[in-house]
Amino acid sequence: MIQLYHVYKQYGAEAPALSDVSLEVRKGEFVFLTGPSGAGKSTLLKLVFCAEPASAGQILVFGRNVSRIRSSGIPYLRRNIGVVFQDFKLLPDRTVAENVAFPLEVRGQHPREVRRRVESALRAVGLEHRTGKFPLSLSGGEQQRAAVARALVADPALLLADEPTGNLDLDRTVEVMALLEGANARGTTVVVATHDRGLLARHKKRIIALENGRVVSDGDSIRRAVS
Amino acid sequence: MHRLVHLIRRAVDALRRRPFVTAVAVGTIFVAVLLTGVFAAAFTGAQRLLSAWARDVPISVYLASGADLEQARTRAALVAPGARVEAVPPPEALRRLRASLGEEAGVLDGLGPEVLPASLEVRPSGLSLAETRDLAARLARVPGAAEVDYGAAWLERLETLLRRGRAVGLALIGLLAAATAVLVSNTLRLAVYARRDEIDIMKLVGATDAYVGAPFLVEGLLQGLAGAGLAVAVLAGAAVALLPWLRAAVPLAARLSRADLLPNGLLLALLGGGAALGLASSALSLGRFLRRA
């Protein structure tokens, strides 16, 4: 699903954000990407969904080398990837339903089909009673559930979540993680970047740890450590 | 079909969400199209008046002494079919000159008709200035013709003046269009910038540049059409309101109609030009943004 070979990413003259990163995430896996702030977690996710190019190395997503994908082809790759951010990235002047409908509308789906799938996605995250509300009138947990609904509404093969619970209390964190695990159980490959050790301790998943842009461990050793 | 409906709905929705930016863009295009229309109407009107003037100007063919007046009239009638050709022998020419001088006719006392040449007076109907010029050239080849006069000097001076004015006007319209495109493009760039979060999210979920850009182009087109449509309506209204005054003030304009000043083709061109201006401005601002995004 995702393969990185000796990937480097450098911004200007600063120290590399990623340095010689090689890893593989297989189809159907649930992987935590962890490490302290500035370790390179978000940068790695950005490279995977082609928000930025790697400075060196090869990245394969769905078996395609992303450095060889023309800019006009990137949107089509992204249609198979759902992304969730810590700050939700919901448009404040659109209703919850309109925000969730975005990925379907850009695919040119029929409005009837869009309505049906949006309702279904909002029901799945428990927001069916909030469809006409604007994001700022929702709680943080509800906003993140709406963002998860948007990421999953088009049934992506891959879900990337960058600190999805960073702004949430424990109860809301449990809710959002349940949604991500549910998507994984239905076949979606999930990669969650987090520095929350409690989260890693509660969920028995593969953990890739980054530090100063390098992979320092890959497996469940960290969970054992944090436990 | 639903994609087109969705696209138009997105564009109209965006216009509704940003009434101030929409008003500025529509207003700027309105002013540019209005100024262009006023200029074009003034020139079209001036050209119509010049043509009307040229139509009323008789062509005088002065014959050399001893030329056969009747033979010249017959040949002139052949050269200018449909025109009224009148032979003016010297005594008639002198009588007309006296009549035209009125109280000053005394200055001609003592002169005989032999001082004036025989001439032909040709009154073509409905000819343009260029056609009048061609006819005068053909009449100059009539046997016995010595000189042809159709008020060429002042008519041609006026025509040259109009031609130069049109060239300057076209250059000014070009500059005005460019300035408007930059102004509207900067206004729309603000609108694009204000929606950068929306654009970022659209691109994040797999929107192509065409999907992101199409509503902005439709917005530009609609703003252009609205601004130009408003300007065309104001121009047509002003022409209808001012024509009675113009007809009363300038006798040659007596038969001038709204279509003479602002032909339908010109109104359509202004409408199309405004729409193209809105579209170009939008494409310019969007191109800059998408290149950076």
Image (spheres, coloured by chain):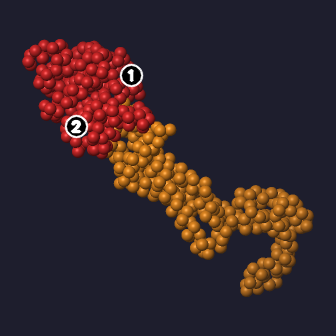
Residue B110: name its quadrant. bottom right
Residue B72 place in picture, x, y as percent: 88, 64
In the depicted structure, whether residue B288 falls above or below residue B229: above
- What is the crowding at mark 2: few (fewer than 14 residues within 10 Å), some, or many (at least 20)? many
Chain given the colour orange? B
Residue A117 place in picture, x, y as percent: 36, 33
Q: Residue at x 78, y 59 (%)?
A: B135
Q: Residue at x 56, y 70 (%)?
A: B242
Which amino acid type corresponds to the residue marked 2 in the rendered image?
Glu
Residue A157 place in picture, x, y as percent: 33, 22
Cα–Cα gap, marks 1 and 2 = 36 Å
Q: Residue at x 52, y 50 (%)?
A: B273
In the depicted structure, whether residue B1 falls above or below residue B161: above
What label does residue A142 carry, if any? 2
Horizontally, is B207 left or right of A9 in the view? Answer: right
Q: Quadrant of the C terminus of chain A?
A: top left
Q: Residue at x 50, y 49 (%)?
A: B275
Q: Of the residues tagged 1 and 2, which is closer to the observer?
A: 2
What label does residue A69 carry, if any? 1
Q: Colour of chain A?
A: red
Horizontally, is B111 left or right of A17 in the view? Answer: right
Which amino acid type corresponds to the residue marked 1 in the rendered image?
Ile
Residue B53 place in picture, x, y as percent: 69, 67
Q: Nearer the viewer, residue B203 or B8?
A: B8
Q: Nearer the viewer, residue B84 or B31?
A: B31
Q: Quadrant of the N terminus of chain A?
A: top left
